[in-house]
Image: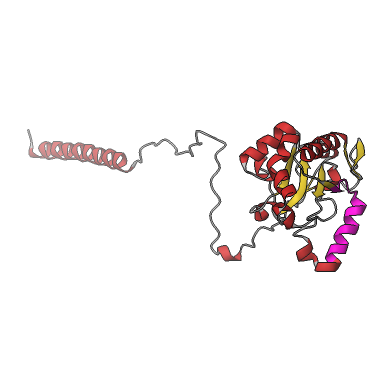
Amino acid sequence: MSRKKFVILVLIALVIISGLTAWWLYKSHQSTNTAPTSTPITATKPADSSVKPSTPAPANPAAVPPAPTTSSWPVNLSMAEAVSTTVVVNKKHKLPDSYVPAGLTTYGGVSLRSEAASAMTNLVNAANVSGITLKMISGYWSFASQTTIYNNYVAQDGQAAADTYSARPGFSEHQTGLAADVGSSACDLDTCFGDTAAGQWVAANAQNYGFIVRYPKGKEADTGYQYEPWHLRYLGVDTAKSVYASGKTLDQYYNVAAGGYQ
């Protein structure tokens, strides 16, 4: 072979080798820089879709105005509630202004619902058998009567003092026709009645005739009223005995809010 042909073949071989090398380098470079295909990331819905993210606390809590506070008192009792013999009337539970109990009857010069009057007759007769003479002082009071009585006490002693022994209009048990004030020749409408033979007999026996001493001694903070040994409330014999045995006030017995007007 001539020298010239040999040189030509070598050059052709180098061109082929160079081309193959360039192609291999190109493919390697392309493979290295191509990002692999990835699965797109999506938000995962909570298992319980009802759960919502909590609201972040404000940066400055003091800047958030407090929620307005409103009193839920008094509870205005309905006519249907007012007629119940076990209705709880106190400084937080008010009777309708227009409520007048049905079946009012007169006993001992005062008006009471018929069932209360019948029970009071039995109580007074039983006291007489025991040598105790009780007299009736008051029973049913209308809304108008309550207004007059309360305003007179406020004028006499001031509202703060009056509120400890006299109910505001609509807040008195006397409007139910189920409450009665009793007394004796020794003491009327005063705590001294509790120390008399009549007062002690009433405290020990009233429940047997369907009554309780509504505002007992030592429960002033619970009832919102001073001790009133003369103020009796008719509930019916079974309920009265149960309340008496519990040692609770009527409010506590029924787990009803009581105390002050607010």
Query: Could you tell me how many numbered marks the image carries?
Result: 0
Residue at screen point 31% across, 41% down: 30
Q: Quadrant of the C terminus?
A: bottom right
Residue at screen point 84% across, 47% down: 135
Q: Quadrant of residue 49?
A: top right
Q: Which residues are magenta?
A: 136-154
* Image coordinates for residue 112, horizontal then vertical, percent: 87, 41
Residue at screen point 48% across, 38% down: 42
Q: Quadrant of residue 11?
A: top left
Nearer to the camera, 259 or 65: 259
- Left of 69 or right of it: where is 19? left
* Image coordinates for residue 247, horizontal then vertical, percent: 62, 43
Q: Quadrant of residue 207?
A: top right
Q: Quadrant of the N terminus?
A: top left
- Left of 50 or right of it: where is 258? right
- Left of 242 or right of it: where is 77? right
Answer whether residue 73 is visible to the viewer in this image: no
In the rendered image, residue 245 lying in the magenta stretch gets the answer no
Q: Give the dominant element type of the magenta stretch: helix, strand or loop.
A: helix
Query: Quick check: 261 above or below 12?
Result: below
Query: Quick check: 253 above or below 219?
Result: above
* Image coordinates for residue 186, horizontal then vertical, percent: 78, 55
Residue at screen point 86% across, 67% down: 155
- Left of 240 or right of it: where is 109? right
Nearer to the camera, 23 or 127: 127
In the rendered image, residue 147 lying in the magenta stretch gets the answer yes
Which color scheme does this rendered protein use? Answer: secondary structure
Answer whether residue 21 is visible to the viewer in this image: yes
